[in-house]
Amino acid sequence: MAADQENPPEARRAAALAPLPDHRNVDTPWWQELWRRHAHITTPLRERGLECDIEFGLSAYIVRVSLPDDSYLIIGPPQEPPSDRPPGSPEGWIATREHPDNPSLFEVLYDSAPCDDPGAPQRPEARHGGSIQPLIESIDHRLAQLGLLPTPSSPTARTPVSAAEPALLTPKPADVSGNADRTFVYGDVLLALTDRLNATESPTDAALLHQILDPTSGLLERLGEFFEAAAEKAKESEQDDGFDLHYDLQDAATTLRSLGEDLHTAVDRMRALAPARRTTRAGLPPGPSQGPPTATTPVPGRTR
């Protein structure tokens, strides 16, 4: 189906994903558009073996994540008052854990939504706003504490990756034993990202570019850290060429970070290139294909 089309072998090797939800809306254009807009959340969670779905909350679309103990996560923007931002790109995220048969099991795992009450204490994650990486890290940490992160059944069981989903990938360790046929898995991950960029329908899709240029967790920043670590290892040899290599690698790290600084506005500029589209109140393209919102459990009010 369109939400999870067949991709080249590089993309299939990159990530093992939990299956798509099983309901009739999955094959509708309006649901597939919602899925695309939330792929930066659903993809990393599906890589952790968690099944996700897109539903409608009190006033905005949310991601519902099924957990192994029959509880679930609700991840979405603030519901009261409703946000006027498009689905998948709110001013902040709220993630709660709930259980259908146990109302007392309710906790806020993450809340980066802005607070309008000047007297209310600000949660530490509020500084992250609509960023995804801190949200995923917080969910990872809490679910690991609870023992609710599923273990993949087999490292060879691969599900085709959608070309529309951002590359938030966790590669397997590379074989560095010196074998001639070893796989350059990190290069394969970047190749899969490039394949997705080439396959995206929009020439101005900024989500993939953000994977490279994010100043905290983007590829350029991580490469800078890698070259700094390699530089320290080279210096440990205490040989003349080790010191020379140390400075060369340090220069490489500096160049990468400088490149990120030079391109710090590129993501916003890419988004600005997208043609304006007439939208409905929910932020979806108008027309009969949109379909009705799916009924779901309302998102409870924020807890401070």
Image: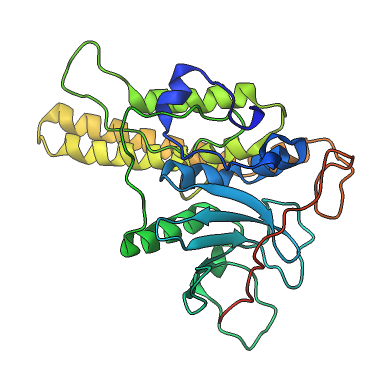
Q: Would residue 266 be seen by someone viewing this image from the given angle?
A: no
Give the residue drawn at x 16%, y 31%.
242
**In this rendering, position of residue 274 left or right of residue 89:** right
In front of the other: 250 or 8: 8
Question: Which one is in front, 235 or 208?
Answer: 208
Residue farthest front in this picture: 101
Question: Given the current orientation, which residue lies at the most extreme top position?
Answer: 180
In the rendered view, does 81 fall on the left or right side of 103? right
Position of residue 77 relative to residue 33, above or below, is below
Of residue 199 and residue 219, the one placed in the foreground of this image is 199
Instruction: Give the total of numbered labels.
Output: 0
> Which residue is located at x 36 percent, y 35 percent?
251
Q: Position of residue 138 (x, y in %)?
A: 44, 61
Image coordinates for residue 2, horizontal then vertical, percent: 66, 28
Residue 267 screen position, x and y as percent: 65, 41
Relative horizontal placement of residue 218, taking residue 21 as reference (left or right): left
Residue 156 seen? yes
Residue at the outermost left position: 238
Q: Residue at x 59, y 49 (%)?
A: 53
Quadrant of the drawing holding the N terminus: top right
Task: Reply above or below: 26 against 148.
Answer: above
Measured as percent of width and height from the top left, residue 196 is found at 57, 26
* 32 to 116, vertically: above or below: above
> Which colouring convention does the figure follow?
rainbow
Q: In which quadrant of the rendered image does the C terminus lie?
A: bottom right
